[in-house]
Image: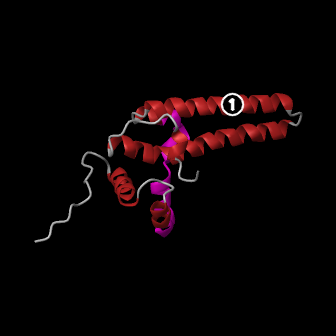
Amino acid sequence: MQTDSPLPSYAGHPQRWAERFEFFDAHGVPGSPSYKEAFKKLTFMQRIKIGSNLPAFFFGPIYFLVIGLRRTAIATFGFACALIIVAVMADLLIPNARVADMIGRMAGLLVALVCAQVANYAYYRKEAKREEERWNFFKLIRWI
């Protein structure tokens, strides 16, 4: 009888997290060649489920605090504050209110997208790998 060592079952985690964890176990870090190759083969809905996190998109740093990622919450909050400062400066310096408003909206969207991209792999590193949480969340984004 041949016994292969199966992937961890991730008991205690919901099915959606277990699927994400198994994908990361099988294909590695987001952005790696094997991850990119496997990610391309997924259906659209599977890509959304594995590659991004909807609650993190809408709630950002608050969601990170809820799932226990304190450093990531602080870092993304700092990133959001920096972008708010940029948006306010643009509002003060650009005479066209429409352009300044668009810069502010784009800054908010950027923070939301970064949070959505970072959440799954950061939580995987914390829960499955039991690794120490990083301050530099940009290393967790798959498109950088």
- Tell me: residue 119, above or below residue 74: below
Crowd tier of the residue under label 1, counting other residues whose Cα lies within 10 Å: few below 14, some 14–19, many 20 or above: some
Is residue 57 visible to the viewer in this orientation of the structure?
no
Who's the residue at 51% across and 64% down the image?
44
- Tell me: residue 118, above or below residue 76: below
Who's the residue at 50% across and 51% down the image?
52
Residue denoted by label 1: 84
Residue 49 placed where, x, y %? Answer: 46, 56
Who's the residue at 49% across and 34% down the image?
135
- The answer to which quarter of the image holds residue 131 is top left
* Segment colored magenta: 40-63
Who's the residue at 77% across and 41% down the image?
102
Residue 122 placed where, x, y %? Answer: 44, 43
Colour scheme shown = secondary structure
Q: Secondary structure at mark 1?
A: helix
Judging depth in this view, the residue of 141 and 99 nearest the camera is 141
The quarter of the image holding the N terminus is bottom left
Give the residue type that dot 1 points to.
Ile
Judging depth in this view, the residue of 29 and 97 nearest the camera is 29
- Tell me: residue 104, above or below residue 17: above
Judging depth in this view, the residue of 73 and 44 nearest the camera is 73
Seen from this angle, which residue lies furthest bottom? 1
- The answer to which quarter of the image holds residue 28 is bottom left
Q: Taken as a whole, is the magenta stretch helix, strand or loop?
A: helix
Would residue 144 be found to the left or right of residue 8 on screen? Answer: right
Is residue 61 visible to the viewer in this orientation of the structure?
yes
Residue 109 placed where, x, y %? Answer: 64, 43
Would residue 48 be found to the left or right of residue 108 on screen? Answer: left
Indicate whether residue 127 is drawn in magenta: no
Seen from this angle, which residue lies furthest front? 33
